Amino acid sequence: VHCWSQIQNIGSIPGSGNFSIDSGLPFAPAIDSMVCGSVMLNYVNINGGSTYSVVPTIDAAEDVLIYKLEDNDEWGPVTWSAFSTNDDVQIYLTYYTEA
């Protein structure tokens, strides 16, 4: 299944936690399904080292999360603290189902 999501001009930023989209995915992901895709961020300020990649993933609750990959460090979620009002996010992802 291929999905595309665009969030423009984010208006309300939660106080803390990881960025997530209560996805309402069209089909349930397969158990331990692999996700591939890309993320485009506009004005998002990811603190830390040199961030080389930002990728989508799906958690056990079927929410879409964004993970960052940095030089010489483990991957980790992008948190809401990286976002400000009016930031933009585009997510493209492909995942497998049991069907």
Image (tube, grey):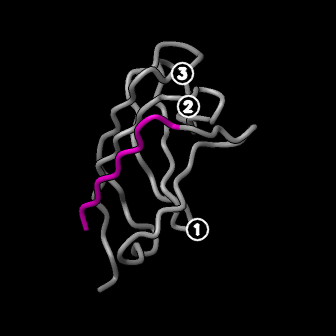
Counting other residues with Cα less than 10 Å from the Cα at mark 2, is it few (<14), some (14-19), or many (20 or more)?
few
Q: Residue at x 40, y 75 (%)?
A: 30
In the displayed image of the protein, which residue is found farthest to the top? Answer: 49
Q: Quadrant of residue 13?
A: top right
Q: Quadrant of residue 89?
A: top left
For the N terminus, the image quarter is bottom left
Per the image, the residue denoted by label 2 is: 74
Q: Residue at x 51, y 67 (%)?
A: 62
Tag 3, which secondary structure? loop
Circle 2: residue type: Glu
Q: Residue at x 36, y 60 (%)?
A: 34
Whole-number angstrom distance, CA of label 3 to CA of label 1? 25 Å
What is the number of the mark on residue 46? 3
Circle 1: residue type: Ala
Mark 2 or mark 3: whose residue is earlier in sequence: 3
Locate residue 32, reporting x and y percent.
45, 67
Front-most of residues 99 and 87 = 87
Task: Name the chief secondary structure element in magenta.
Answer: strand
Whole-number angstrom distance, CA of label 2 to CA of label 1? 23 Å
Q: Are marks 2 and 1 in contact (CB under 8 Å)?
A: no
Q: Which residues are magenta?
A: 1-10
Locate residue 41, reporting x and y percent.
39, 29
Per the image, the residue denoted by label 1 is: 61
**Viewer-nearest of discs 2 and 3:** 3
In the displayed image of the protein, which residue is found farthest to the bottom? Answer: 99
